[in-house]
Image: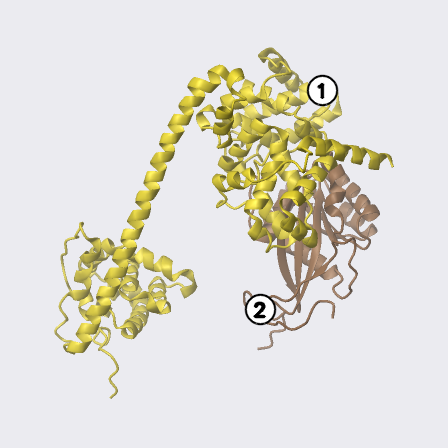
C-alpha cells in the first residue's frame, strides 16, 4: 500500500506542469553523442551510428515528481572543422552534455575546451554535464575517473561515466540534469529559452510550470 | 429462466472439445476464423476473442480493419483449419487445456452477443474441398453445416435473421476482395507502364543524348527528360558528363594521391587528423546499406577516394559529410570516375563555401534562401519565425550531404540528377520544394519537431510530390535572379563583417 515513489501515470497522461528545455550535446567526433541520445530517446543502440552533419534533433520527456521535463535535444556534429557553426547550436540552450570517450585522452581535452567555451559564451546559468562515455570499454580506459571527477567538481559540472551500449547511467545523467534545471522561474533567455507548454493531458486547467 | 438469444455452442461443451486439443498454429487459424465469422460490428468482442486465443492483450491487435482484412484474406485457410481441427481432434495437448477453456468462454460470449455464428460451424465436418473459383463462397460450409443433434432447432425467425446477416458478411467480404483485386490490377498496370516508359527513356539517353552530349545537353528535350530523373542505368554516365572534368584529373594523378595517402609520414598534422576522421566515418556512412562497413565491398574504395582527396586538396581536407557525397558517387560509377567527380564537384561555389566552412558565404546562401522562402511560402515563413525555426537547422544537413542523408536514396538521387542539371540553385529550389509539399504538416509542428521531420523525411514522401512542388518554386524575386540575390547578400555580409 505504502508506495511512496513518484505516482505512476498511465501512458498518455501527463501531469499538469510541462517544462521544456533545450539541451545541446557537444564533444569530439565518434565519442558517442548520437548513441547516447538514441539510447535515451529510443532505448536502442547501433554499432554503426550514421555520422551527424550539422545537428540532429530529438525530444524526450521525463517525469520528476509532478513536473514533466521535456528535453529538446540538439545533437551536434563533432568534427573540429565544424566548430565555427557550434554557437548557432548552443545559443539559448539551458543544458549541455559535453561528451568524451574514456578510452581517448584527446577527446577529454576537447571536452574541457567545450566546457570553457560554454561557460564563456553560452546562456548564463547553463547546466553542464560531463559524460565519460564508452564505459563498456573500461579495460581500454585512458581517462581516469578521478581526473574527470576532480575536473567536474572544480568547474561545477555534473559528472557521470556512461555507456550508450549497455545503457549504464544514460537515463541517470539526463535525470540529474532535469533535477538541476530551475523549474520555477520565468527567465526566458536569448529568445529560445525555456518555453511553457500547456498541458496536453486530461487536466486542461490553467496550470503551467511558472505558477 | 430467462432465455435471451440462441443457445451458445459452448454451453454444451462441443467447442471446448475442439479447442482443448488444438496446437498453437491451429489456435491462430481458429482465431482468424472466429473473428471473421463474428461480424466486425462489435470489434472489441472479436478482438478479445482473438487475443485470448493468442494469450495477448487486446491492444496487440491494433485495428479492426487490419483484423478483418486479415481474416477475409484467410478464407481459404478457414477450410484448411477445419480439416486441421479434425486431424488434431484425437490428439491431446494437456498444456493448452486451461488457456483454451478461458478463451472459449470469451469466444462464446462474443459469439452469443453477435448471434452470427452457427453452432454447426464447429461440428465435426471432415473434408472440404476448397472452391478456387469463389473463395468466399467456400466458407459457406463453415456456417451452414448441419446443427449438432444435441442442440435444439432454431426458430424460423431466428434462422432467417442469421441467414440475412451471414449474407451481409459474405457480400462485404466479396466487395472487399474485388476492390483489392482491382487495386492490384491497377498497380500492375502502372508498374508495367513505368517499366515501358523507363525502357524508352533509357534508349533515348543511350542512343541520342549521351553520344551527342555537347549538342544535346542544353536542348529542351534533354532537359525535360532530365527533370523527371535519370534511369539508374545511365545515371552515372550522365552525372560524369554533367560534372565534367575542368580540373583535368587523370588516373595517374589519382594513383599518386592514393600512394601519398598510404605514406605514413605526412607533412602536416592536419592531414593526419583528416585521415583519422575518414577512417572513423567510412563505417558510419549509410550504415543501413551495409556496404561501407569494415570488410564490406566498398570500405576500402571509399577510404581510398577520400584519402586521395585530402592529399590532393590539403587546403580543404576532409569534412564530415564528404563521405556521403563520395558514397553517392561511388554507388553510381567506378572508383576513378567517382574521384574525378568528387574533386570537380567540390569546386561548385555552394559546396565549396560550405566545405571550407566559409561563414560569410554560408550566411549569404542562408539569407538568399530566406528571401526566397518568404517570397514563395510566406505563410510557412511566418510560422517558422513564430516557432523559432531557423533555416540553418535543416539546411546544413541538406547541403553538406546534398540531401542524401535525410531521405531515401531513390529520392535523393532525383535531387542529385537535378542538382547536376541546374547547379547550385537547385539545392535551394529543392529545399523549398520539400517545404512546400510538406507545408500542411509543418504548419502543425513546433520548431524541434519541424527540424526533426525535415532532417528525416518520411518514407511516404514521393518523388512525384517533390517534383510537382519544386516546379512551382520561383527562384527569382521580381527581376532579381538567384545569382543576383546571392551577390547582393554577399555584399551585405561583407559590409556587416567589416562594420
Residues packed near mark 1 inside 10 Å, few (<14), some (14 to 19) or many (20 plus): few
Q: Which residue is mark 2?
A: A9
Chain shown brown: that is: A
Q: Please name whichever residue, B117 or B255, is drawn nearer the observer in this view of the structure.
A: B117
Q: Residue B268 location, x and y as percent?
A: 75, 22
Q: Residue B220 location, x and y as percent?
A: 51, 25
Q: Please name whichever residue, B174 or B147, is drawn nearer the observer in this view of the structure.
A: B174
Give the letter of the chain under mark 1.
B
Q: Which residue is mark 1?
A: B266
Q: Colour of chain B?
A: yellow
Q: Please name whichever residue, B59 or B228, is drawn nearer the observer in this view of the structure.
A: B228
Judge whether residue B340 can be spotted in this image: yes
Q: Please name whichever residue, B320 or B178, is drawn nearer the observer in this view of the structure.
A: B178
Q: Residue A2 location, x and y as percent?
A: 60, 77
B460 over A60 or under it: above or below: above
Instruction: Please identify the quadrant where the N terminus of chain B is shown.
Output: bottom left
B248 over B292 or under it: above or below: above
- Residue at 19% x, 57% y is B137
Tag 1 and tag 2 share a subunit: no
Q: Nearer the viewer, mark 1 or mark 2?
A: 2
> At numbered mark 1, what does the secondary structure look like: helix, strand or loop?
loop
**Quarter of the image holding residue A86?**
top right
Label disc, if present, on residue A8 of the rendered structure: none
Residues packed near mark 2 inside 10 Å, few (<14), some (14 to 19) or many (20 plus): few
B90 over B452 or under it: above or below: below
Q: Give the colour scheme of this rendering.
A: by chain
Determine the residue located farthest toward the bottom in the rendered image: B1
* Left or right: A83 in relation to B384: right
Judge whether residue B456 can be spotted in this image: no
Q: Residue A88 location, x and y as percent?
A: 74, 44
Determine the residue located farthest toward the right in the rendered image: B499
Amino acid at each position: 500500500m505504502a508506495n511512496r515513489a513518484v505516482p505512476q501515470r498511465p501512458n498518455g497522461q501527463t501531469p499538469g506542469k510541462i517544462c521544456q528545455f533545450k539541451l545541446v550535446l557537444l564533444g569530439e567526433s565518434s565519442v558517442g553523442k548520437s548513441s547516447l541520445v538514441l539510447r535515451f530517446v529510443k532505448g536502442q543502440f547501433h554499432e554503426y551510428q550514421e555520422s551527424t552533419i550539422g545537428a540532429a534533433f530529438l525530444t524526450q520527456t521525463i517525469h520528476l515528481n509532478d513536473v514533466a521535463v521535456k528535453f529538446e535535444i540538439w545533437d551536434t556534429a563533432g568534427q573540429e572543422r565544424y566548430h565555427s557553426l557550434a554557437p548557432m547550436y548552443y545559443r539559448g540552450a539551458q543544458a549541455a552534455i559535453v561528451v568524451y570517450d574514456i578510452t581517448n585522452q584527446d577527446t577529454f581535452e576537447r571536452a574541457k575546451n567545450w566546457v570553457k567555451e560554454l561557460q564563456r559564451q553560452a546562456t548564463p546559468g547553463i547546466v553542464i554535464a560531463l559524460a565519460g562515455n564508452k564505459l563498456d570499454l573500461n579495460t581500454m580506459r585512458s581517462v581516469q575517473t578521478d581526473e574527470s571527477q576532480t575536473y567536474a567538481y572544480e568547474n561545477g559540472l555534473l559528472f557521470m561515466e556512461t555507456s550508450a551500449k549497455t545503457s549504464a547511467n544514460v537515463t541517470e545523467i539526463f535525470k540529474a540534469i532535469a533535477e538541476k534545471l530551475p523549474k520555477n522561474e520565468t527567465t526566458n533567455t536569448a529568445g529560445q529559452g525555456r518555453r511553457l507548454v500547456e498541458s496536453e493531458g486530461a487536466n486542461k486547467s490553467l496550470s503551467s510550470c511558472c505558477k | 429462466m430467462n432465455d435471451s438469444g440462441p443457445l451458445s455452442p459452448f454451453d454444451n461443451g462441443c467447442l471446448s472439445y475442439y479447442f482443448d486439443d488444438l496446437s498453437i498454429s491451429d489456435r491462430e487459424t481458429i482465431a482468424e476464423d472466429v473473428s471473421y465469422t463474428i461480424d466486425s460490428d462489435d470489434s472489441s468482442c472479436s478482438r478479445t476473442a482473438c487475443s485470448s486465443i493468442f494469450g495477448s492483450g487486446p491492444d496487440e491487435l491494433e485495428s479492426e480493419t487490419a483484423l478483418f482484412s486479415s481474416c477475409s484474406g484467410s478464407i481459404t485457410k478457414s477450410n484448411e483449419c477445419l480439416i486441421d481441427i479434425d486431424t488434431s481432434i484425437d490428439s491431446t495437448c494437456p498444456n493448452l487445456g486451461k488457456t483454451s477453456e478461458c478463451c472459449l468462454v470469451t469466444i462464446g460470449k462474443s459469439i452469443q452477443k453477435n448471434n452470427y455464428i452457427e453452432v454447426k460451424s464447429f461440428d465435426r465436418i471432415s473434408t472440404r474441398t476448397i472452391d478456387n473459383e469463389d473463395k468466399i463462397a467456400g466458407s459457406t460450409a463453415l456456417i451452414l453445416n448441419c446443427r449438432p443433434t444435441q442442440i435444439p432447432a432454431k426458430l424460423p425467425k431466428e434462422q432467417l435473421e442469421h441467414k440475412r446477416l451471414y449474407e451481409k458478411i459474405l457480400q462485404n467480404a466479396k466487395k472487399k476482395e474485388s476492390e483489392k483485386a482491382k487495386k492490384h490490377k491497377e498497380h500492375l498496370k502502372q508498374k508495367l507502364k513505368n517499366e515501358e516508359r523507363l525502357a524508352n527513356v533509357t534508349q533515348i539517353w543511350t542512343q541520342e543524348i549521351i553520344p551527342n552530349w555537347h549538342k544535346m545537353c542544353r536542348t529542351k528535350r534533354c532537359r525535360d527528360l532530365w527533370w523527371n530523373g535519370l534511369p539508374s542505368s545511365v545515371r552515372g554516365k550522365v552525372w560524369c558528363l554533367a560534372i565534367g572534368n575542368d580540373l583535368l584529373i587523370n588516373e595517374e594523378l589519382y594513383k599518386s594521391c592514393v600512394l601519398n595517402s598510404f605514406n605514413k609520414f605526412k607533412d602536416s598534422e592536419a592531414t593526419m587528423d583528416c585521415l583519422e576522421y575518414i577512417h572513423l566515418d567510412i563505417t558510419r556512412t549509410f550504415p543501413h546499406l551495409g556496404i561501407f562497413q569494415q570488410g564490406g565491398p566498398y570500405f576500402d574504395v571509399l577510404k581510398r577516394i577520400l584519402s586521395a582527396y585530402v592529399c590532393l586538396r590539403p587546403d580543404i581536407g576532409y569534412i564530415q559529410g564528404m563521405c556521403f557525397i563520395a558514397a553517392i558517387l561511388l554507388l553510381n560509377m567506378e572508383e576513378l570516375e567517382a574521384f574525378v567527380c568528387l574533386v570537380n564537384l567540390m569546386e561548385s561555389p555552394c559546396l565549396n563555401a560550405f566545405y571550407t566552412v566559409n561563414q560569410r558565404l554560408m550566411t549569404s546562401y542562408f539569407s538568399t534562401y530566406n528571401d526566397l522562402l518568404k517570397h514563395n511560402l510566406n505563410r510557412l515563413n511566418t510560422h517558422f519565425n513564430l516557432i523559432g525555426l531557423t533555416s540553418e537547422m535543416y539546411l546544413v544537413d541538406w547541403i553538406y550531404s546534398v540531401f542524401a542523408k535525410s531521405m531515401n536514396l531513390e529520392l535523393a538521387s532525383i535531387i542529385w540528377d537535378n542538382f547536376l542539371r541546374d547547379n547550385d540553385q537547385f539545392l535551394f529550389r529543392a529545399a523549398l520544394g520539400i517545404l512546400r509539399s510538406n507545408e500542411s504538416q509543418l504548419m502543425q509542428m513546433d520548431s524541434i519537431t519541424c527540424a526533426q521531420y525535415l532532417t528525416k523525411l518520411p518514407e511516404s514522401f514521393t518523388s512525384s510530390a517533390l517534383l510537382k512542388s519544386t516546379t512551382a518554386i520561383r527562384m527569382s524575386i521580381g527581376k532579381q535572379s538567384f545569382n543576383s540575390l546571392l551577390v547582393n547578400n554577399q555584399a551585405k555580409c561583407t559590409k556587416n563583417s567589416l562594420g
